[in-house]
Image (cartoon, grey):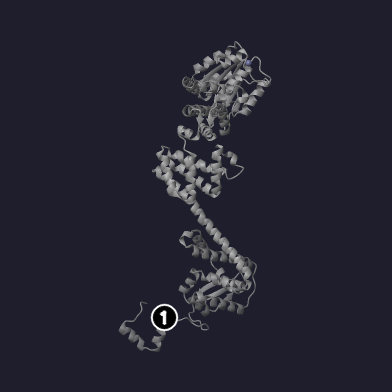
């Protein structure tokens, strides 16, 4: 027995009774030489080279996952070093007495101990006793200790001395799936070989070879499913293959295999992804229900969906396409679907499915948990579309802006002042507007487009003007200041009469060369000017008009209360007071009819 475990042997024995022909062939394809070992070519080559050069170590440690060929290699190794007449390639001849004994499973040169079941000190002491006895035929006695990490501490200690100074005819091959559990004193006495998982490609190629020789028809996708299910173990792959053959007979189809192995059909994932792209959450939910009805585990499904997105992602680039491990026909479907998914979509989808998988166990309503994820997946494209749309609108508006700029340069000049007032928008306001633009569902597309257009224009102008402004710091006369002030007030008449008249009323004074004092009547006015950002706008307007960026506007409440030179603004109570002074009868009139305001 070389390639298959005891369990598989039993299974094969069972099949032997039912399907004699198949079993005989399967045994025919067991790896008998290093060259035929699947998926471990570098290790096989190294071992063979060591035999060639007659540089044998006394102890080897074979590490790696289950079913990847550790015991197979150990057996081939034992057979090869004991062959009486190895061929030119240093492979065992298969003809000599020793080789025949190996082939018939009756050789005394090989001793196997399963440390998982025999891990006591006594078992190891028995083995140590055996080690002293030289082999009857052949040069070496090979001791294979499987699952060596299962040995008890005492057994390890008993074994150490022998491992350190074994007799010349003894070779130990320790095998383990858990290298980290081996104590350093053992590790340091062994030559260590790390076995790889069997790639899907290698497993498929090997099963294909067996199927062809057995005249079994197969679909490539079916063999890929078997290899995937085996998860890197050749032994599992073969045992699954046996199971499938006994179910399907001489023709292995994808449909039969997924039915027999209870694997979720790729087709579901493709249909679901199409639904996500269309934003069709209803279909997605119905498909999910269908999957649950078939008895599939919900978490198994979400993990499968996650791998599906991963597979689509690797199809997006020629460098990563080799990472796609599926049959040719399904690979075509993947490439086709990858063509209609954006990378952005796949990243978001992977994110959603991973989060869903992580949170699945702790979710109180697991079905709803997955359904929510499906809804989120259906929403990716529509959310992305609106984003793209807004980007497009901004782009076109910029384009149109440029074109109109070219066609009407004169108009652009006359509009300059108009624009400059637009420039003086404080950054918070712009931010606010942009946020609105990012949530386009709140405005109609038409309104939205004009809004983004104005934002784009404003932002561009601000940037340009800011650059200009940064470089200037010119001197100005009082007369220039007054003109600029008046212009600013004139502009404000259109927007806000109250503030404009306040500006008209005040006479700006320049202090320290760069502080413009704006006298207002009361704190209410001062606060309003500052809170509404008007003071800032006036300031930047003056900075531009006077070409001086160091200018600051200082809004002050006029304490004197009587500005003789400047015309005064009259409030309602001022007027009432004035009228009372002019006509004392008014007071009586008010008293009679109780016409006081609440002040
Ligand atoms: Zn031989």
Q: Is residue 267 above or below residue 132?
A: below
Name the element at disc 1.
helix
Which residue does the image show at 62% across and 17% down from the upper left?
94
Q: Is residue 222 above or below residue 478?
A: above
Q: Is mark 1 within 8 Å of ligand 1?
A: no
Q: How many marks?
A: 1
Q: Quadrant of ligand 1?
A: top right
Residue 9 in picture, x, y percent from top left = 50, 21
In the displayed image of the protein, which residue is found farthest to the top? 136
- Which residue matches tag 1? 572
Q: In this view, does 465 lie above or below 75?
A: below
Relative to 323, 305 lies left or right: left
Q: Can residue 261 be seen in this view?
A: yes
In the displayed image of the protein, which residue is found farthest to the left? 592
Instruction: Name the foreground residue: 518 vs 205.
Output: 205
Q: Residues within 10 Å of mark 1 (few under 14, many from 20)?
A: few
Relative to 90, 154 lies left or right: left
Instruction: Name the foreground residue: 47 vs 498.
Output: 47
Residue 132 in picture, x, y percent from top left = 58, 13
Q: Classify the position of the C terminus by image quarter.
A: bottom left
Residue 85 in picture, x, y percent from top left = 66, 15
Instruction: Name the foreground residue: 10 vs 278.
Output: 278
Q: Is residue 512 visible?
A: no
Q: Classify the position of the N terminus by image quarter.
A: top right
Residue 424 in picture, x, y percent from top left = 55, 69
Q: Is residue 487 above or below residue 180?
A: below
Relative to 254, 88 lies left or right: right
């Amino acid at each position: 027995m070389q390639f298959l475990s005891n369990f598989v042997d039993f299974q094969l024995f069972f099949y032997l009774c039912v399907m004699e022909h198949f079993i005989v062939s399967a045994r025919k394809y067991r790896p008998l030489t290093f060259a035929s070992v699947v998926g471990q070519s570098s290790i096989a080559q190294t071992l063979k080279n060591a035999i060639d050069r007659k540089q044998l170590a006394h102890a080897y440690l074979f590490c790696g996952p289950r079913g990847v060929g550790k015991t197979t290699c150990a057996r081939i190794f034992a057979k090869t070093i004991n062959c009486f007449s190895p061929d030119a390639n240093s492979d065992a001849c298969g003809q000599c007495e020793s080789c025949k004994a190996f082939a018939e499973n009756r050789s005394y040169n090989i001793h196997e101990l399963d440390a998982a079941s025999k891990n006591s000190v006594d078992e190891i002491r028995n083995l140590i006793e055996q080690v002293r006895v030289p082999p009857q035929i052949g040069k070496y006695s090979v001791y294979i200790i499987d699952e060596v990490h299962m040995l008890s501490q005492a057994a390890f200690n008993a074994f150490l001395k022998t491992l350190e100074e074994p007799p010349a005819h003894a070779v130990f091959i320790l095998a383990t799936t858990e290298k980290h559990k081996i104590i350093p004193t053992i590790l340091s006495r062994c030559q260590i070989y790390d076995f790889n998982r069997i790639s899907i490609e290698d497993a498929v190629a090997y099963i294909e070879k067996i199927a062809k020789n057995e005249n079994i028809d197969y679909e490539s996708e079916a063999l890929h499913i078997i290899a995937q299910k085996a998860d890197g173990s050749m032994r599992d792959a073969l045992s699954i293959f046996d199971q499938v053959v006994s179910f399907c007979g001489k023709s292995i189809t994808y449909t039969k295999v997924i039915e027999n192995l209870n694997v979720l059909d790729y087709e579901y994932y493709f249909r679901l992804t199409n639904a996500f792209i269309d934003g069709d959450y209803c279909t997605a939910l119905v498909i999910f229900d269908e999957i649950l009805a078939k008895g599939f585990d919900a978490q198994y499904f979400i993990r499968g969906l996650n791998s599906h997105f991963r597979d689509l992602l690797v199809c997006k680039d020629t460098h990563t396409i080799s990472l796609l491990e599926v049959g040719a026909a399904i690979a075509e479907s993947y490439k086709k679907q990858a063509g209609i998914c954006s990378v952005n979509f796949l990243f978001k989808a992977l994110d959603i499915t991973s989060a869903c998988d992580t949170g699945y166990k702790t979710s109180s309503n697991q079905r709803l948990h997955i359904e929510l994820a499906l809804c989120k997946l259906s929403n990716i494209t529509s959310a992305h579309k609106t984003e793209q749309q807004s980007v497009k609108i901004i782009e076109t508006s910029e384009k149109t802006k440029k074109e109109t700029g070219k066609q009407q340069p004169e108009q652009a000049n006359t509009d300059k002042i108009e624009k400059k007032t637009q420039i003086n928008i404080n950054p918070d306001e712009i931010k606010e507007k942009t946020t609105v633009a990012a949530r386009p569902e709140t405005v109609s597309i038409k309104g939205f487009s004009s809004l983004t257009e104005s934002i784009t224009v404003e932002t561009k102008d601000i940037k340009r003007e800011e650059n200009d402004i940064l470089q200037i710091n010119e001197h100005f006369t009082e007369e220039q200041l007054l003109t600029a002030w008046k212009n600013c007030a004139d502009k404000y008449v259109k927007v806000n009469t109250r503030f404009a008249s306040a500006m008209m009323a005040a006479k700006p004074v320049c202090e320290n060369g760069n502080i413009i004092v704006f006298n207002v009547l009361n704190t209410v006015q001062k606060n309003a000017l500052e809170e509404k950002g008007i003071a800032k706008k006036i300031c930047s307007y003056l900075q531009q008009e006077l070409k001086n960026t160091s200018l600051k506007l200082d809004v002050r409440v006029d304490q004197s209360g009587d500005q003789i030179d400047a015309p005064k603004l009259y409030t309602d109570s001022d007027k009432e007071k004035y009228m009372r002074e002019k006509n004392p009868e008014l007071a009586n009139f008010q008293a009679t009819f109780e016409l006081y305001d609440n002040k």
